[in-house]
Image (cartoon, rainbow, N blue to C red):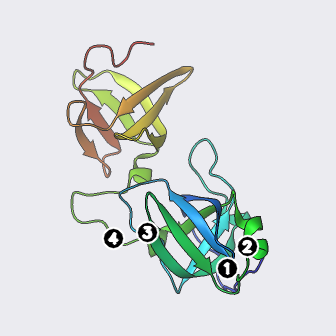
Amino acid sequence: MTQDTHTSLPGRLVALGEIVGTHGVRGLLRFRPYDRASSLPPTGRPVYLTARPAADGTVDSSVARAITLEVARSHGSLALLGIREILSIEAATPFVGHVLAVDENDLPAPEPGEFYVYQLEGLDVVTDTGERLGTIERSFSNGASEVLVVHDGAREYLIPMIADVVRSIDVAGKQVIIDAIPGLLDN
């Protein structure tokens, strides 16, 4: 695989999505973002090619390869990406199955009161009656909303991030308060 040189190692990597296939004969890649609401990956500056995130959502930056995207354009629910020096389907094929990530420091700063979902990892989840449910280990999208995966020992809860359930999120205070609507905590 072609690799652009990048002199400094990235900090924490945030996975943007997965390369799911090739497109055409000129080496474009089909990219499925993890967050459908997110913008296209940045062009002209380093992004990182790596393996799928671990179950806890972390990306191993020690195996990440810096690449530079020259093309990033929407294509239905996917995006088409062009990598510098990849000019054929044969050269693009080895990239399929890899994840594209960015250095956390390269993300735009969220507006006051906003946050990135990955920043919720490690926060405690408490019901509005004060019962601690556990810690957010990761999140995923179910197509309708983001879902928080909360663990407390062997117990796991799937908490949808919808207005009827999530009452408040305090990233600085490391706590999410939810309304445990009927059936939410049943296994």
Relative to 132, 26 lies left or right: right
The residue closer to the viewer here, 84 or 99, is 84
Marker disc for residue 157 = none
- Could you classify mark 1 by the number of other residues whose Cα lies within 10 Å: few (under 14), some (14-19), or many (20 or more)? some
Image height of 96 relative to 57, above or below: below
Relative to 181, 103 lies left or right: right
Residue 161 visible in the snapshot: yes
Residue at 57 percent of width and 69 percent of height: 11
Marker disc for residue 26 = 1
| Labels 3 and 4: the sequence-earlier one | 3
Relative to 145, 34 lies left or right: right
Q: Quadrant of residue 5?
A: bottom right
Q: Which residue is mark 3?
A: 74
What is the total number of numbered labels drawn onto the structure image?
Answer: 4
CA distance for labels 1 and 3: 17 Å
| Labels 4 and 1: the sequence-earlier one | 1
Amino acid identity at mark 1: Arg
Residue at 31 percent of width and 38 percent of height: 161
- Secondary structure of the residue carrying tag 4 is loop
Image height of 145 relative to 100, above or below: above
Nearer the viewer's eye, disc 3 or disc 4? 3
Amino acid identity at mark 2: Ile
- Secondary structure of the residue carrying tag 2 is helix
Q: Which residue is mark 2?
A: 89
Amino acid identity at mark 4: Ala
Q: Which residue is mark 4?
A: 109
- Secondary structure of the residue carrying tag 3 is strand
Nearer the viewer's eye, disc 1 or disc 3? 1
| Labels 1 and 3: the sequence-earlier one | 1
CA distance for labels 2 and 3: 19 Å
